[in-house]
Image (spheres, rainbow, N blue to C red):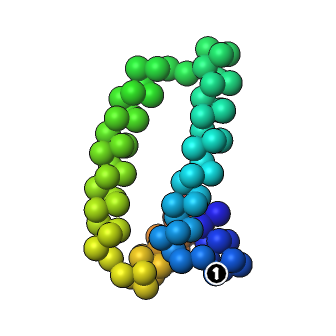
Amino acid sequence: MVPLLIALLAYDPRVATATSLAAIIFTATFATLAHGALGNVEWGTALLVGIPAMAGVNLGLWIKSRMSTAALTYAFALLLIAVAIDMAFT
């Protein structure tokens, strides 16, 4: 979603990232409630993964606030290239 917001709607990368995350909140909340009602959620594991992930978000925001928009865009592009290469050879 982030690359589409940047490329098609000319969003600033920081705004595109935040907008994407805001949209994910609704999807994740609904999916968690639906799967929780079906008994598909291992709540202990969810907490074990979720709590450190929140710390990672704060660290990522701290790093991102110190990067220029161009550096952030290039870093994201490099990440996408690395993932594509990994997928091609896996």
Residue 82 drawn at (x, y percent) = 48, 70
Taking the image as shown, residue 36 lies to the left or right of residue 86, namely right
Name the residue at 56% across, 68% down: 16
Q: Amino acid at mark 1?
A: Ala
Residue 27 drawn at (x, y percent) = 65, 41
The quarter of the picture where the C terminus appears is bottom right
Residue 25 drawn at (x, y percent) = 57, 44
Q: Residue furthest right?
A: 8
Taking the image as shown, residue 5 lies to the left or right of residue 46, namely right
Taking the image as shown, residue 56 lies to the left or right of residue 17, namely left
Can see residue 32?
yes
Tell me the crowding category of disc 1: few under 14, some 14 to 19, or many 20 or more residues within 10 angstroms, Cα based.
Answer: few
The quarter of the picture where the N terminus appears is bottom right
Residue 76 drawn at (x, y percent) = 47, 73
Count every numbered label the image shows and give the total.
1
Mark 1 highlights which residue? 10
Per the image, label 1 sits on a secondary structure element best described as: loop
Front one among 84 and 52:
52
